[in-house]
Image: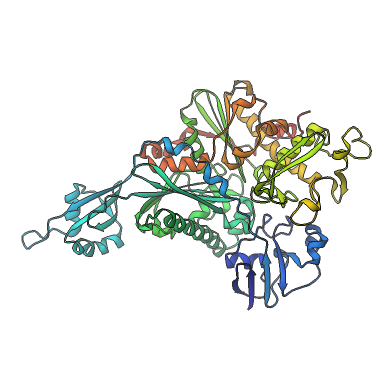
Amino acid sequence: MHKVTFLPQQKVITVPPGTNLLAASALAGVPVEGNCGGKGACGKCKVRIVEGDRKEPTAAESKGLSADELANGWVLACQREVCGCTVAEIQAARDACNRKTTLHRAASVIEPEPSVEKIALKLSRPSIEDQTSDLERLRQALSRQELSVNLKLLAALPGALRRRRFAVTAVISDQQLIAVEPGDSSGGIFGLAFDIGTTTLMSSLIDLSSGAVLAVTAATNPQNVFGSDVVSRITHASKSPEYLTALQQKVIETLNIMIAGLSAQTGVRTDEIYEAVVVGNTTMSHLFLGIDPAHLALAPFIPAFQKALELDAADLGLAMNRFGRVTVLPNIAGYVGSDTVGVILATDLDRRSDPCLAVDIGTNGELVLAANGRILACSTAAGPAFEGAQIRYGMRAADGAIEAVDIYNDDLKLQVIGGLKAHGICGSGLIDAAAALLKAGAIEPSGRLVNPETDALKLPASIRQRIRRGAGGFEFILADASQTSTGSDLVLTQGDLRELQLAKGAICAGFKVLLREAGITSEDVECVLLAGAFGNYIRVESALAIGLLPALPPEKIIPVGNAAGDGACMALISKSVRRRAFALPKRVEHVELSTRQDFQEEFINALAFPG
């Protein structure tokens, strides 16, 4: 066994020989990004060897790291097996999650209709004349003879009743007794709404009596060390039951840290949190529950469950009232999950009469069309590029990310999150860069960067000089070494543009298929709703310029914030909304794109940028 120390966290772990540093970081709970699932392809899992293995760089490291980085001891964690005592420095963490916590919209307009209630009771005390059992005494006082109770709660009931001489508060969720508390504690009823995204976990603490959102927090999904996309995580989970358990535990552990933070921030005790509602894509819902998602990866893409599930918090290990209820909202299909149900709820797509499209562009792209009394939904494999994966200098929207690109007076202008030197480029910056260079003539409609020596003579010199030949074709210098945190040029490569074309082509083609299926055209659409943090921060004009969205007037394209999380909050606050959620899978028509010839044709047609 070998000891590995991670700096600056000072986390120490002992691992067997042959364990690579990426796996060791996952075991230690240290966040190291690994978008490709440890294949050495993304070049993102950078760590610096302070002490230990200093072997020659692998082929993947020579390709993914600059000469300066290699000289200073930086390696790719997935390429380095631990073969002795090792000290590794992790890149400074950049918080990509804070933007999602400011995007709540719909939950604040829902009338509270909690499924949890507290009833203060003063029970008659047993006697020789009245030998009614404790549970039946409680049921009689509540006039609820069908009230069910967990065995462990039943075991604690006699002591709970007698500690306060039969003056207690019963906490009930529908017909389930979930707590018996001493005295009158009828004041506080709280719940949690979880949005379990492939990239980001989000949690909201809500006062169920008033419907008020008390606090919101977010964190990076720690499963990212096993890959940035759902297929990578399905593959990892399928290797063994232990791997599946590890994926589940990572999410539960992070959610519990978030719950503790929300409790500290608001003063709400965790045992006062009686209910939780969870949304996520179908794979994330499976992994949250520890259910093998293997059959989601292969046709016909069958999930283990579709309808909503209700479980005890203790069974999942969530740090709330141990008898509290956790509801996972229903899935629609193998790649259209309960997060899409949340989007439908938050945007009222199930109640609209005007044709309306909604798109949630994250690590996956889900699209929903409401038209002519129908609701159609599909999923496209488009997201990783927009989240920074598969882009040479891609990163999530965090400090140091280029988030906006403009060309003014023939000069390139960058906007970097946090006002820092550029460290990478996030999805909104990628779309901006492509739109600006397309308008300037530096990119052809085919997606090809122009040759600066033969095809770019009409470009301003300041733009033309930024185009150079790289290892994989021409590349465009977004920020030179003096403008970056790494001291190396930050470039947009021809490969990056191809990844963007694939991603935007899939989204656009999905729109076209849904419109055709509904028998309408883009001119009939009254609005396009952009859900999620990404949708809230992209420039509509840039998205239209590259053909990501249907060619509509910009005023018809409306950001709606974190609609999936809002939908979870709404279902937590209101029993009526939750019933709507439970009914949606039967109403929504899933359109499977993988087998449709028209999707393939539309996808090919949508790859080019608008001319």
Q: How many marks?
A: 0
- Residue 606 shows in the view: yes
Q: Is residue 379 visible?
A: no
The image's colour scheme reads: rainbow
Indicate the quadrant where residue 41 lies: bottom right
Expressed as whole percent of the image width and height from the top left, the position of residue 16 reads: 63, 75
Q: Position of residue 559 (x, y in %)?
A: 57, 34
The picture places residue 430, in percent across and down from the top left corner, at: 72, 42
Furthest residue to the top? Answer: 524
Along the viewing direction, whichever of 523 and 512 lies nearer the viewer? 523
Looking at the rendering, in which quadrant would you find the C terminus? Answer: top right
Relative to 518, say whether 240 is above or below.
below
> Could you tell whether 172 is left or right of 466 in the image?
left
Determine the image quadrant of residue 539: top right
Q: Tell me: 491 left or right of 553.
A: right
Tell me which residue sits at (71%, 57%) in the image.
44
What is the quadrant of the N terminus in the image?
bottom right
The part of the image, by quadrant, that contains residue 13 is bottom right
Q: Nearer the viewer, residue 466 or 526?
A: 466
Which residue is located at x 40 percent, y 47 percent? 206
